[in-house]
Image (cartoon, rainbow, N blue to C red):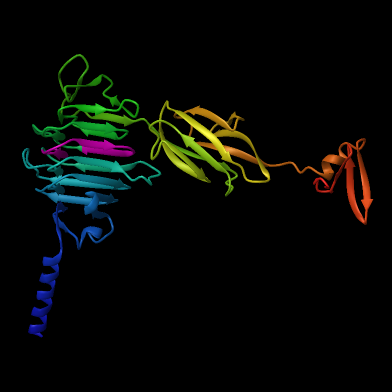
Amino acid sequence: MKKFTLFLAALCCCAMANAETYGLSVGGIQVTSENASDIFGDGTVSYDASAARLTLNNADIRMDGKGAIVAAGNLRIEVIGDNYIEVKNLGEYAGAAIQTAGWLIIYSSIEATDFSNLQIVCGAAPALYALSGDIHLDYIVNIDIKGGTGANGCIKTLNGDLNIYGVGLSLLPGWIRVNNINLVAECGEITTPTDAIIADGKIVRNGTATEYGEQQQVVISSLYRKLTVGSNPPLDYNIISVSSERMYPTENIAFVGHEVVFVPKGKEIKLKVERIREGYEFESWWKVPGEDKVFSTDLETTYIMDDSTSGIYANFVEKTHEGIDEVQRNKVQSTKVLRNGMLFIERNGVLYTPSGQIVK
């Protein structure tokens, strides 16, 4: 039995030796080719080495005295659902909750139908720290940071920029240490405090070079609004297209049924009926909610995205049956004709079947 146990141990060592080790640790676990598909064993964290992509799917990561996610190179973090990272007892110069030796990108899943959430609670050290390169916060993610009270602030790059594109970002305190903060104004805006501006890579009080205090929360709100576009009734043949500048996940899409997209508030949306199911006809475009739903009867139209609209639908109705019913409404010009035991209708010199087809 002892020899067998030793043999199993030797096999395990060989398996670990054959596993490829990646330059990434998550929650204190070294990521390898063997555990990358399910790092915690619960389906919440996975890593694709070929894309340098770490996926957090309703993950809960808690550490004491160490960074929660540490990468030896570039790292993409895809956020799905609600995620929580907490790091206790990180000293001012003890790294960060999420730290990369290269650039860092945090973004939402392309299949997301709602904003994803990432909350980071840390101590004096930064929540996000890129040693070489920029930090990108992209698309429909809400990131809530509490911590970073030390000299390095809550977000730091050694020589890069912070780029914010559509993300909702809450910071307490709002101390950022980067070369430049690039906020895409069409997709986001500072809403708290109301007198806050971006200057020299920091968030400061307007008219001064002074950052806000440790107890002041800074909020950058996303201008992306969720919009469902579809066909009513949801027929399987009608094709609708929708396009808009900076629309997520793509700026132009044609589809059957319905699609969920995210459009920045104030952006023009182009809508078009591309194909109509046989037996139906287009009636109007209408929006929800609201009592006055109809806003256009054109096959191709535009709409300005606002806070009051959650859905836009192309409304279709069945065509009115023509043929004998229509002919009978004009009895002066219509005559029933019986030929070879079959009933036809003659109208204005043209012979029709009862269903309205012309007899050749």
> Does the magenta segment cover residue 142?
yes
Instruction: Give the answer, above or below, for where 193 lies relative to 162.
Output: above
Image quadrant containing the N terminus: bottom left
The residue positioned 66% from the left and 46% from the top of the image is 278
Residue 90, image x, y percentages: 9, 43
Residue 224, image x, y percentages: 38, 33
Residue 351 located left or right of residue 53: right
Q: For this rendering, which residue is in front, 303 or 337?
A: 337
Instruction: Give the answer, above or below, for where 266 lies relative to 82.
Output: above
Residue 175: in sight, yes or no? yes
Q: For this rendering, which residue is in front, 209 or 281?
A: 281
The residue furthest front is 360
Residue 229 located left or right of residue 193: right
Quarter where residue 233 is shown: top right
Q: For this rendering, which residue is in front, 337 or 281?
A: 337
Q: Which residues are magenta?
A: 125-145
Residue 256, image x, y percentages: 53, 46
Q: Give the mark count.
A: 0
The residue positioned 59% from the left and 29% from the top of the image is 296
The residue positioned 68% from the left and 45% from the top of the image is 279
Residue 159, image x, y percentages: 12, 32
Quarter where residue 43 is shown: bottom left
Instruction: Give the answer, above or below, for where 94 lies relative to 225.
Output: below
